[in-house]
């Protein structure tokens, strides 16, 4: 057996050395670089979140001031709440108010019913459900009057449909509207 030539031995030695260096890099250096990149990404993300948190923290004081102002202007003097001794009387007043409003915008109530009230914290929720017939413009006017006035009222579960007359499929300008209307009163329970 002959001994390999010197250049061949040097080439093999260089290849072995390169393989050892590549293995050392993969085993030692690459994991450290990956951890560094991961930590750097995590720091950047945390910095972004910190900036957002500080911005929200600055807004918190303004929001608390707005809440205090609204509490004093609205619920503090009771204007935002429905007024009455019990939920039945308040619901009857709410029905009268809705009937008068429908009449003023040119709508016709088909039915108005009182739904069971519920306690939510220190307040009692009073809800009525109605079916009415009115034009699109009347619907807009009615919804604006209900949601923009005092006491604060909420319109929920709105279902709007066109009235179809006759067998030809023609519809009129009137709509059939079904919705729930509710507001809050101070609870009689302690």
Image (cartoon, rainbow, N blue to C red):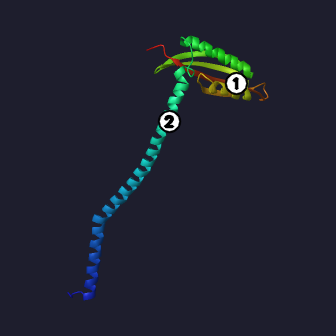
Q: What residue is drawn where x is 28% and y is 80%?
A: 14
- Front of the two marks 1 and 2: 2
For the question of whether residue 130 can be seen, the reply is yes
Q: Which residue is mark 1?
A: 176
- Whole-percent x, y for residue 127 in the image: 57, 19
Q: Is residue 167 above or below residue 190?
A: below
Q: CA distance from mark 1 to mark 2?
A: 40 Å
User: Is label 1 in a helix, a strand or a loop?
Assistant: strand
Name the quadrant of the C terminus.
top left
Position of 149 with respect to 190 (left or right) is right
In front here: 43 or 33? 43
Answer with the quarter of the image where residue 182 lies: top right
Q: How many marks?
A: 2
Earlier residue among tags 1 and 2: 2
Q: Position of residue 117 (x, y in %)?
A: 53, 16
Q: Is residue 6 left or right of residue 121?
A: left
Image quarter of the N terminus: bottom left
Q: What is the x, y in percent for residue 5? A: 25, 88
Residue beneath the point at 65% across and 14% down:
96
Graded by Cα atoms within 10 Å as few (under 14), some (14 to 19) or many (20 or more), the crowding at tag 2 reads few
Name the residue beneath numbered marker 2.
Answer: 63
Comparing 126 with 159, the one in front is 126
Could you tell me if the residues under marks 1 and 2 are in contact, i.e. CB atoms within 8 Å? no
* Secondary element at image label 2: helix
Residue sitting at x 48%, y 13%: 188
Q: Mark 1 Cα within 10 Å, few/some/many (few <14, many 20+)?
A: many
- Return the x and y of residue 8 as percentages of the image width and height: 27, 85
Say if 140 sits above or below 131 in the image.
below
Is residue 5 visible to the viewer in this orientation of the structure?
A: no
- Residue at 29% x, 78% y is 15
């Amino acid at each position: 057996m002959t001994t390999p030539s010197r250049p061949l031995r040097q080439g093999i030695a260089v290849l072995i050395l390169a393989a050892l260096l590549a293995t050392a890099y993969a085993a030692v250096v690459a994991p450290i670089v990956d951890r560094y990149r991961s930590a750097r990404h995590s720091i950047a993300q945390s910095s972004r979140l910190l900036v957002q948190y500080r911005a929200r923290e600055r807004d918190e004081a303004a929001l608390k001031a707005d809440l205090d102002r609204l509490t004093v202007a609205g619920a503090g003097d009771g204007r935002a709440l429905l007024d009455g001794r019990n939920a039945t009387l308040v619901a009857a007043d709410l029905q009268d108010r809705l009937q008068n409003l429908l009449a003023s915008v040119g709508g016709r109530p088909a039915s108005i019913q009182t739904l069971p009230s519920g306690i939510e914290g220190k307040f009692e929720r009073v809800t009525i459900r109605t079916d009415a017939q009115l034009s699109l413009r009347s619907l807009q006017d009615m919804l604006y009057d209900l949601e923009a006035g005092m006491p604060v009222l909420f319109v929920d579960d709105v279902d709007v449909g066109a009235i179809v007359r006759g067998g030809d499929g023609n519809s009129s300008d009137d709509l059939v509207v079904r919705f729930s209307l509710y507001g809050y009163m101070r609870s009689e329970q302690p």
